Image: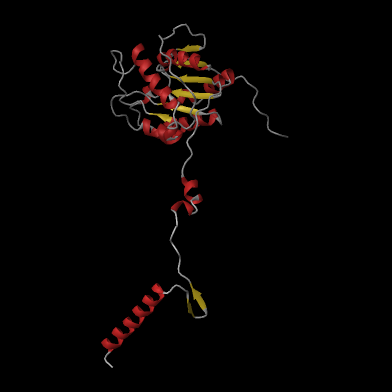
Amino acid sequence: MNSQIKTLLLFLVAFTAIFIYAVSPIGVTFAQQLLRKVDLEGFRPQDADTTAIETMVEEKIVPDSTSQRFLFVGDSMVEPLAYRFYDICKENGDTMYAVTWYGSTTMAWSGETLDYYIDKAKPTYVIFCLGSNELYSKNLKTINENLLKMKQKAGDCPTIFIGPPNTKPDEGLNDEIAKVFGKKSYFDSRNLEMERRSDHLHPTSAGARTWMDEVAQWMNSDSCSHPVVLNVPDCKQSYKIETIEVMQVKDKGKRFSGQKPQNPA
């Protein structure tokens, strides 16, 4: 018999078997196994087990509504922002201790000065804001090491980093900050639309309000790694703040005087 005819006959036999199975109301036994058809009538998608799918959906982080003690430190950008942040903290029942160190860098804040203020303020939340004095530094390896030290000193305390508001491309500083602290703990201030002083970098009082309000709204959302409730008040900025400390460029910083843990005998 021609091979083509054999193939055709096999195809017809297989097709006939499938057709009989499709129209038969009962199962078909094959190799001592009963083959049953699945009745899809009345089947609903919600009947399926979706547990695995649901676990893949990330839960939305609810902002923390408890009172916070913010330690807000950094370079000269902190001072104008702290005036507005003080009002935001008052609105939400929080407290703020701010330190603005003119001309400071990541190197300055990676030392004992940060230990000193963490010990003094005993914060529940740490905010860094600096980098404007290192925008065009190409020594990213050292900057990375400094940032890591700062993050380690903050420990388990929720921490965010407000990046510098440069309007021109830097040499990789902002990318390094985002890499060390994480994208959800880094607020990108580059090219932020705000009123600036004649140096085209520092914000005016109005510009600082715009900038800080943007940061507060970000901190109040799940875009931030540690969101907290920060309702922005509609009021004028305060200028009499007891919890803001100013350090000059010539200052060498503070030395931590707390008891260092002793090595066990």
Residue 138 in the image, given as x and y percentages of width and height: 35, 31
Residue 199 in the image, given as x and y percentages of width and height: 29, 15
Q: How is the image coloured?
A: secondary structure
Residue 14 in the image, given as x and y percentages of width and height: 36, 80
Q: Residue at x 51, y 8 (%)?
A: 242
- The answer to whether residue 194 is left or right of residue 252 is left
Quarter of the rendering occupied by the C terminus: top right
- The answer to whether residue 65 is left or right of residue 212 is right
Camera sees residue 252: no
Residue at the far right in the pictured view: 265
Residue 171 in the image, given as x and y percentages of width and height: 32, 31
Quadrant of the image occupied by residue 19? bottom left
Q: Using the image as rendered, state which of residue 235 and residue 186 is in the foreground.
A: 235
Quarter of the rendering occupied by the N terminus: bottom left
Q: Is residue 42 above or below residue 160?
A: below
Camera sees residue 260: yes
Residue at the far bottom in the pictured view: 1
Residue at the far top in the pictured view: 240
Q: Is residue 104 above or below residue 171?
A: above
Q: Residue at x 39, y 24 (%)?
A: 131
The number of numbered discs placed on residues in the rendered structure image is: 0
Q: Using the image as rendered, state which of residue 33 and residue 127 is in the foreground.
A: 33
Q: Using the image as rendered, state which of residue 55 and residue 204 is in the foreground.
A: 55
Residue at the far front in the pictured view: 25
